[in-house]
Image (spheres, rainbow, N blue to C red):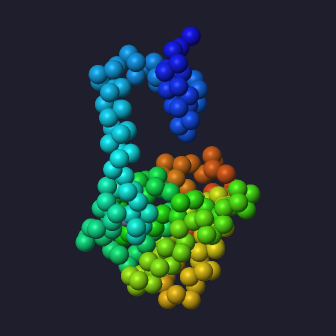
Amino acid sequence: MESKEIKNLITLMAKIPGLGPRSARRSVLNLIKNPEKLMLPLAKALIQVSENIKLCSICGNIDSDHICGICKDDKRDKKIICVVEDLTDLWALERSNTYKGCYHILGGVLSAIDGINPEDLRIKELINNIKENDVEEVILATSATLAGQTTSFYITDLIKDMNVTVSRLAQGIPIGGELDYLDDGTIGAAIDSRKILNSK
Ligand SMILES: [Zn+2]
């Protein structure tokens, strides 16, 4: 059997989403086998990140300062705000390297079942940001789930009188996706958000 310390580490690792007990045990074994290259640097990195992370007071991004690198960047368009559910969505959009506006992280989606109401999300902050920065466009990038759509409708309704353009990310066929393999909902969404290439 594992020692008490190792057991504790496995229990903690198993709480990380996507790991689970079996993967946690394997990961811990891997750490133990590589103390210098992996375990100590990881422990150090965990402490460093936990001591230095701060929530951006404007967009809710996580960075080492109270105003994040994106909000500080003069090259980013402050008049366009992309509303996302979580930090991982912001990271995904940043990886695409195409978006040059700013963000607003909601911190989740509305869900009656889970008891998540508008006041549990950073919606008030979004309204303040739109007002204070004379935002011209809000891009809704919540997920295509029922909760994501509900949140998107809620925000659209809330800001409809605010003189701001509201758009949402196109949904549909993934790059490399074959029609025959896609579900009806995806194909329907792709038709609805089709793009005119050459109008007569
Ligand atoms: Zn920010």
User: Which residue is depicted at the point 52% across and 53% down?
Assistant: 174
In this rendering, would 36 be left or right of 159?
A: left
User: Which residue is depicted at the point 70% across and 60% down?
Assistant: 115
Location of residue 54 with respect to 134 vertically, above or below: above
Q: How many marks?
A: 0
Nearer-the-camera pick, 108 or 194: 108
Location of residue 149 with respect to 199 vertically, above or below: above
> x%, y% of residue 184?
69, 56
In this rendering, would 176 be left or right of 156?
A: left
User: Which residue is depicted at the point 53% across and 25% down?
Assistant: 8
> x%, y% of residue 187?
63, 58
Nearer-the-camera pick, 34 or 78: 34
Ligand 1 resides in the quarter of the picture at bottom left
Location of residue 152 with respect to 109 vertically, above or below: below
Q: Residue furthest top?
A: 1
Location of residue 40 with respect to 157 vertically, above or below: above
Nearer-the-camera pick, 75 or 69: 69
Q: Residue furthest left?
A: 74
> x%, y% of residue 1?
56, 10
User: Which residue is depicted at the point 53% across and 60% down?
Assistant: 107
Residue 149 showing in the rendered view: no
> x%, y% of residue 21?
59, 26
Residue 140 showing in the rendered view: yes
Locate residue 108: give its quadrant. bottom right
Q: Residue furthest right?
A: 113
Nearer-the-camera pick, 180 or 67: 67
Locate residue 155: give its quadrant. bottom right
